[in-house]
Structure formats: structure tokens, C-alpha cells
Amino acid sequence: MANYSKNIIERLTNRGPNVGYCAICRTHGPLTKDHVPPKGCGNINDSIISHVYGNNSEKPGRPLLSQGGSHFRTICGRCNNTLLGTEYDWALSDTVCAIEAYFQRASASRLTLPRTQLFDYQPNRFLRSVIGHLLAANAVPDVTEKDRAIPLDDALRAYVLDPSATLSDQVCVYYWFYPHRRRVVMKHSAMGFCGGNGAAIYGHVFKFFPFGFWVVWDEHGDRSNHFNLRRLADSTPTISASARLVLDLSQLPPADFPEAPTDNGMWLVTDYLVSQAEDRTKPVTPI
Ligand SMILES: [Zn+2]
């Protein structure tokens, strides 16, 4: 019962201890507050962090007010300010801003949107920023335990920490256009299938405007292909490589994809590793 109660508290906790094991580099020392996603992606307003599926009488955790955006005190100053803040985040923020500007222009001109649109970006920096903040999110349990060997997270850390590394072949990063302001993180979640003979898609989900990401670990079979998602794949070890990001603007997955599967699917989560955040002051409406 003690662990159960502890988990109820932890599941809506965004503050780790002042000192702990960095969720990215695993160095033990002072921990700093990391905005998830980074501030340059518009995550600056007071936010309410709550459970993705709401609360019930057995899980009475209260939503948490997070001032100045949704953030987690789970990474060290070097990873926060130098690695992500200086090296990688601008590539993600620039892409998000370019996409926002595109939609503002399209809205003003009332042009019909194309089925797909291309955006210039630096894929190796972009993806490291996404993964770095994903590692920081809902990571309070990670900062209190020294030996927390999780193959997916180990592979993601190795990728973020080494600018010349390529992503492990066992990791597949899917993405889609997510035109919603609700920010969602679901770590170590899995999609199962009724009658699927044990088949599952396991990984992390990270959603914030304008992207949904599904970081899938070591999938056997091709079940994820059925969702027709595009895949982010860094094709070169050159950190400054440029490419064009393809964004599909039609036939989008539902806002609650993949956590509310239809047909024969099921979604499995660990309670305190899933959270959502929404701006407190602004009305939250899909655009
Ligand atoms: Zn660190």
C-alpha cells in the first residue's frame, strides 16, 4: 500500500529532488527545471498538469499548477542549458515557429491547404531536442534511482549525448501533424491487440502543437504500419545536416491517438508515467 500511495503522489509530480541522477546524462548532482516542450515552442503560460484519463475516486490525485509552462525538475544544468538549450532546441523551435507562421499565412489568405507541406529543418538537432525533453518528462522516478537500466531510454540517452551517433536500429520515431494545444506525455506505454497473440507496440508518446511523436522500441511485426504515420530517420551522422520535413495535413489521426485505440486495440500505461498539460489562462481550443 505504501508504494501504491507513493505512486499516486508521484504521478502528478513535476518536481524531482534538488539533487539526483540527471534523466539524460545520469550524472549525480543538482537538478534543474526543464520545460517540456521547450519554451520556444510556446510553453510559457501557467499550465495545469493532470492525468490523461482524468481522476477517479480510487486515484484522487489533484491536477497540478505549473507556473510559466509545464516543466520537470529532472535534468542537470549542463544537459538543460548547454546540450538542449544551446545545441538542439533552436532547431525544434525554429521548425515549430515556421509551421505556425505557415498556418497564419494560410489562414489570412484563405487558401485551401495542400495534402502535404514541406518545411526546412535540421533533423539531427530537431530529433535530439524532442528526445531530450521526452527523457526529462515524467522522469521523477528516474532521478532517484542510480541503476535504472531501461533499454529504450539507454538508447535514447546515447543518441542525445553523442552528436555524431545515429539512432539505434531498435528505435523507430513516428510523427504526425497534431493541431491541438493539449500537451501529452506517455512514457513506457504500449498498444496491445485483442487476439493479437501477444503483439504490442511499446514506447513513449509525446504530443504538443504541431507534432505528435511515437518513439517505438523494438517492434516485432508491422502493426504500426497500419496507422500510415511518417517516420523521422536521421540519415547522416552530421549534426548540422539539413533536410525537408514532410507534414501531412489531411487524414490526421484523432486528437486522442494513440491512447484511445479503436477496433481491437487496447492501450496500456503506468499510471504515474502519463500526464497532460494545458495552458491555464487561455481557452484551450483546437485550431
Ligand atoms: Zn545531465
Image: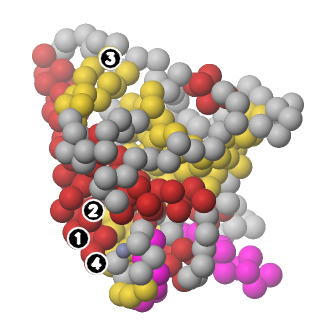
What residue is shown with label 1?
A: 81
Q: Specify the quadrant of the image occupied by residue 220.
A: top right
202 displayed left or right of 284: right
Q: Could you tell me which residue is drawn at 29 percent across and 12 percent down?
A: 114
| Quarter that holds the C terminus | top left
Question: Measured from the top left, where is residue 11 in percent x and y?
Answer: 59, 69
Report the span colored magenta: 1-23
Q: CA distance from mark 2 to mark 1?
A: 6 Å
Question: Circle 2 sits on which residue?
Answer: 84
Q: How far apart are the two marked residues, 4 and 1, measured between alpha carbons?
A: 6 Å
Residue 219 occupies which quadrant of the picture?
A: top right
In front: label 4 or label 3: 4
Q: Circle 4 sits on which residue?
A: 77
Q: Residue at x 73, y 33 (%)?
A: 265
Circle 2 crowding by C-alpha within 10 Å: few under 14, some 14–19, many from 20: many
Q: Is disc 2 in contact with disc 1, using a CB cutoff of under 8 Å?
A: yes
Name the amino acid, label 1. Answer: Asn
What amino acid is at disc 3? Answer: Thr
Mark yes or no: residue 51 visible: no
Does the magenta portion include 6? yes
